[in-house]
Amino acid sequence: MAGEGDEMKGRAKEAVGDLTDDDDLKREGKVDKASGKIKDKVDDVKDKLTKDR
């Protein structure tokens, strides 16, 4: 869940970076999206571990 917010924020930053031709903002967007995906994967692993107990 927490990762979804980061992914959306990243997509927005990338889009604005594309529109304004701002490479730094596009890069920040990519980092935010990757961070969100990682958070989602970590949450998935946590869920699986707690279900197995």
Image (cartoon, grey):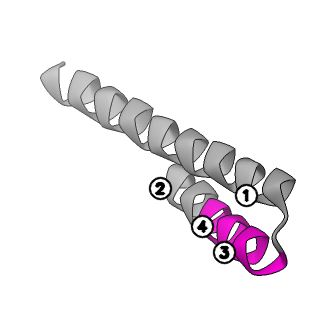
Q: Amino acid at mark 3?
A: Ala
Give the side of residue 53 with respect to residue 38, left or right: left
Residue under numbered circle 3:
15
Of the two numbered discs 1 and 4 in the rendering, the one whose residue sits closer to the viewer: 1
Locate the C terminus by quadrant. top left
Residue under numbered circle 1:
26
SS assignment at label 1: helix
Residue under numbered circle 2:
1
Q: Residues within 10 Å of mark 4 (few under 14, many from 20)?
A: some
Q: Earlier in the sequence, mark 2 or mark 3?
A: 2
Query: Mark 2 and mark 4: span between their CA atoms?
Result: 16 Å
Q: Amino acid at mark 2?
A: Met
Task: Report if residue 13 lies within the magenta region.
Answer: yes
Image quarter for residue 41? top left
Magenta span: 9-20
Q: Amino acid at mark 4?
A: Arg
Q: Main secondary structure of the magenta part?
A: helix
The residue sitting at the left extreme is 52
Query: Mark 2 and mark 1: span between their CA atoms?
Result: 23 Å
